[in-house]
Amino acid sequence: MTEQLGAEAPLATTIVTTGTGPVPRLRHRMSAVAGVAVAAAIAAVYPLVITNPTATNFGVVTLIFVTVASAWNIFSGYSGYLSLGHAVFYGTGAYFLCVAAKDWHLSGAAVFWLVPLGGVAAAVIAVPLGLVALRVRRHTFVVITIAFFFIAQLSASNLGVTGGSSGILVPVPGNWDPATYNNPFYYLALIIAAATVALAWWVRRSRFGLQLRAIRDDEDRAAGLGVRAMPCKLTALVVSAFITGMAGALWVFFIGEAFPQFVFDPLFDLAVVLMAFFGGLGTVAGPVLGALILEPTQLWLNLQQSNSYESEILFGALFLAVILFLPRGAVPTGAEYLTKWRARWRQSHEDAQ
Amino acid sequence: MGTEIAHAIADGILGGGVYALMAAGLTLIFGVLDIINVAQGILVVLGGYLSYVLSVHLHLDLLLGLLITMPAMFVIGVVIYWLFIRPLRGAERTSMTLLACFAVALIVEGALYWRFGSNFVSLSASYTVSSVHMFGFYLSDIYLIGFGLAVVAIASLYLILYRTKFGRAVRATMQNQAAARLIGIDVNRVAAVTFGIGTAVTAVGGMVFGAVSGGFNPNSGYDLISRLLAIVILAGMGSIGGALVTAVFMTTAEALVDIWQPNWSVAVFYLALVIILTVRPAGLFGRRAVRTQ
């Protein structure tokens, strides 16, 4: 009986925590809307105000990671199925764009049309992978996703179509003005990122999102209550893969070349998971915040150091620190502190009266 | 062709012994602690580097060096458990511990790059280059020694588990942690020592791997861990005997495919994993259903 209560508690709290009464909830919602509007405005004018190519480059890559972390969260954060194989989808999108641009002789801005198609390619790959991997749970699922990752990396190194270990080039638009070269990439990344965050927000509020979170809390009970678990999980995975594939395609067009060890990078998976964990697994704002803080930091560290091992050690240490001290992420923990502080403030206020 | 196949089978079986040992450590840790130590691969590499340092700088024989590296890896395992695994509690413990192990792996990998660089090193002694003529073909001594070491280590693992009081406590913890705690077993201590034993075997694994692989660098951990994970999942998590059989079977299959398709031989592991799990999600020897939460 106690176990039953324990299992149901997380779901209950997610519903209750929207506010304490009608007035705070309204105020909360208004401040949230204002926050989103300010963030959108800053993001929209960022490359126009700060025109330094390094800064806009950071902006593009960070937005790509905002997208991927949110997409990962839509599947793994909501359903509890921790995927360490999203690089498969990222890489599929990336290689699709490279190969298609080469075979169809596309160049310049026309290559942008391949970005959504890269997402479709990743979504198509996700269906059989999901049908196999989603049959198992917990550890086994995580390990299967790792296995898929290694299969993908191995295939990229050995198949002829990917150019093997010598890599493959994307025809980059050479006639664009270097000063504003990053801007088309930036705005496309911004559109995809904004749409992904909006989707994550919508899914979390929807019936579908509730089904996913029911699966996360107790899959057998969710199935008993009439949730069709497999279609739910698979849909979430395919949607997540589609977005991740688009992000991968855009990224590879931006950097202009694809090598198996960079396109299928185990650190990519960990980075995405860390961003989601850092911000708060299963929340909408968490992965966004995690990506906005961690990716520029990572890029900046890479600029500062010529060797990669220092950032590797730092990265691992940061990950451990987050897991040990912020296990539920910055957003939920921060919100908790805020509530506690507010309650204490109100208490002292009432005492004074 | 016939001798090639026979040779591949012999190599596969002998090489499988070492993987069996490393996988046994992994599956033991899983059985007792319910965590997947994804750092096992890089710890094997670390064990290899420890042997390398001892043999190059102190001119210590590789086999004698194990007397130092094994306790060292045991202590490292206990420290990792005590600092990073033990504090993790709660509903998300399963995934958190896995990520914690991954983070530890990254730190170890970074430290190894920092100390040793990315150049490949290999372990050498008189017996790493010599070979014996046996059953009609040449088998290198180090393969035989490695296989022998693996057999001895696995046998002692079994003796510890089934013939000592500590082993009984370990098995009790594997069966039911709450009940084990109730009858007075210090579950935390059992878990720490098990984690230590599970990582101590990487010292042996690392030494043999470093001697037979023809060279390793800090990046080798990924290749190792992916094979080990495939083995323990295929075998069914927590089944030590299953891990032994599966390890030998898989390395033999890999050695056979290697004759025709050297680039794709490692894919055998993953393909077998995918196929088996679609048919039998609990793994080949898994007794417990994997479909529990």
Image (cartoon, rainbow, N blue to C red):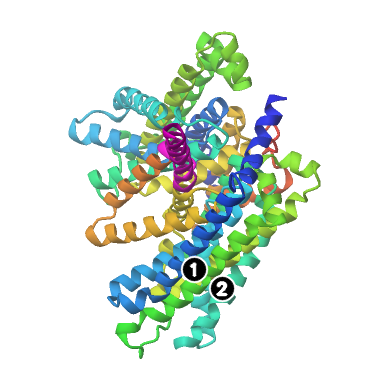
User: Magenta stretch: residue A341 in it?
Assistant: yes
User: Share a chain, discs 1 and 2?
Assistant: yes
Which amino acid is tagged 1? Gly
**Relative to B120, is A2 above or below?**
above
**Circle number at residue A118:** 2
Q: Number of callouts in the render?
A: 2
**Circle number at residue A7:** none
* In front of the other: B276 or A51: A51
Q: Position of residue A332 (x, y in %)?
A: 50, 45
Give the residues in magenta.
Answer: A324-353
**Residue B287 visible from this viewpoint:** no
Q: Tell me whether the residue at label 1 lies in contact with that at label 2, contact meaning CB atoms closer than 8 angstroms.
A: yes
Could you say whether the residue bearing mark 1 is in a helix, strand or loop?
helix
User: Magenta stretch: residue A187 in it?
Assistant: no
Sooner in the amino-acid sequence: mark 1 or mark 2: 2
Measuring 69% from the left and 39% from the top, which residue is drawn there? A218
* In front of the other: A17 or B205: A17
* In front of the other: A310 or A296: A296
Measuring 49% from the left and 58% from the top, which residue is drawn there? A31
Q: Quadrant of residue A201?
A: bottom right
User: Disc 1 sits on a residue from what chain?
Assistant: A
Distance between mark 1 and mark 2 Cα atoms = 8 Å
Secondary structure predominantly adopted by residues drawn in magenta: helix
**Circle number at residue A248:** 1
**Relative to A5, is B138 above or below?**
below
**Residue B20 visible from this viewpoint:** yes
